Image (tube, rainbow, N blue to C red):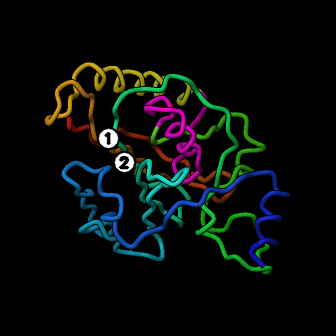
């Protein structure tokens, strides 16, 4: 039965990633300053979801290693935030199909829609003005494998192309340059290290009547290591 579902996903023309949906961010606490995820009243407390029907905790795993962490809103089908460590840059944008989180979907033959609890590439197929906007930018990844891992739709929100390629792109570069110049590992001053939390604020606008188009995206917190 699992093979039938995987075949159906491939027919739809998109890929999937095997990450880890967890009960607590303690599984991948390395991506948070002092190992502590933020407290969000009614959503996240003590690194545990306060509404597991809506908010899912993902330790984003790619090629057998954790690369970053995401708190995902399955109702709005966008991340609340992605958390990662900045240690330098790879510098090139890789080519890879957008991936989905297979654990969010029902693995049986009754599956009638490609994705019920998350965005999927087809949501964007008819859009000219909305693009996939990274919360953990591939341009902040330290190596090629980490950059590839960011191309999961659980790490993206719909962004207007003019914003994604304009002021948001410039903000990504500004934050990156500042971290590169000023953020150092307190245990080894020769190493770059910053803990970054990037989130989105939902709006009342939806893409394809399914995926929330945030009113804004923000670098919520950048802490030196």
For this view, does 83 lie left or right of residue 122?
A: left
Q: Residues within 10 Å of mark 1 (few under 14, many from 20)?
A: many
Residue reaching furthest left? 186
| Extent of the magenta region | 137-161
Q: Secondary structure at mark 2?
A: strand
Q: Indicate whether 179 appears above or below 56.
A: above
For this view, does 70 lie left or right of residue 155?
A: left
**Quarter of the rendering occupied by the N terminus:** bottom right
Q: Which residue is mark 2?
A: 83
Percent position (x, y) of residue 35? 23, 55
Percent position (x, y) of residue 91? 50, 22
Q: Residue at x 51, y 48 (%)?
A: 155
Q: Indicate whether 211 appears above or below 160.
A: below
Instruction: Return the residue nearer the eye: 63 or 14.
Output: 63
**Quarter of the rendering occupied by the C terminus:** top left
Return the mark for residue 27: none
Residue 2 location, quadrant: bottom right
Q: Is residue 99 magenta?
A: no
Q: Secondary structure at mark 1?
A: strand
Q: Which residue is mark 1?
A: 196
Residue 101 location, quadrant: bottom right
Residue 173 location, quadrant: top left
Q: Residues within 10 Å of mark 2 (few under 14, many from 20)?
A: many
For this view, does 79 lie left or right of residue 104?
A: left
Badge 1 vs badge 2, beta-carbon distance below 8 Å: yes
């Amino acid at each position: 039965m699992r093979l039938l579902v995987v075949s159906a996903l491939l027919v739809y023309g998109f890929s999937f990633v095997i990450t880890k949906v967890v009960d607590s961010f303690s599984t991948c606490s390395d991506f948070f300053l002092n190992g502590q995820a933020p407290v969000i009243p009614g959503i996240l407390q003590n690194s545990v979801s306060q509404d597991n029907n809506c908010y899912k905790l993902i330790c984003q795993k790619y090629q057998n290693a954790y690369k970053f962490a995401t708190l995902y809103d399955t109702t709005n089908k966008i991340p609340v935030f992605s958390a990662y460590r900045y240690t330098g840059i790879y510098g090139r944008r890789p080519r890879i199909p957008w991936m989905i989180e297979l654990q969010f979907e029902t693995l049986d033959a009754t599956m009638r829609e490609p994705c019920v609890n998350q965005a999927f590439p087809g949501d964007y197929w008819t859009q000219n003005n909305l693009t996939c906007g990274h919360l953990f930018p591939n341009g902040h990844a330290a190596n090629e494998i980490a950059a590839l891992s960011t191309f999961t739709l659980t790490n993206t929100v719909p962004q207007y192309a003019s914003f994604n390629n304009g002021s948001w792109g410039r903000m990504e570069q500004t934050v990156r340059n500042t971290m590169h110049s000023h953020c150092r590992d307190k245990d080894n001053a020769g190493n770059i290290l910053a803990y970054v939390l990037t989130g989105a604020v939902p709006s009342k606008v939806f893409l394809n009547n399914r995926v929330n188009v945030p009113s804004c995206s923000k670098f919520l917190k950048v802490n030196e290591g």
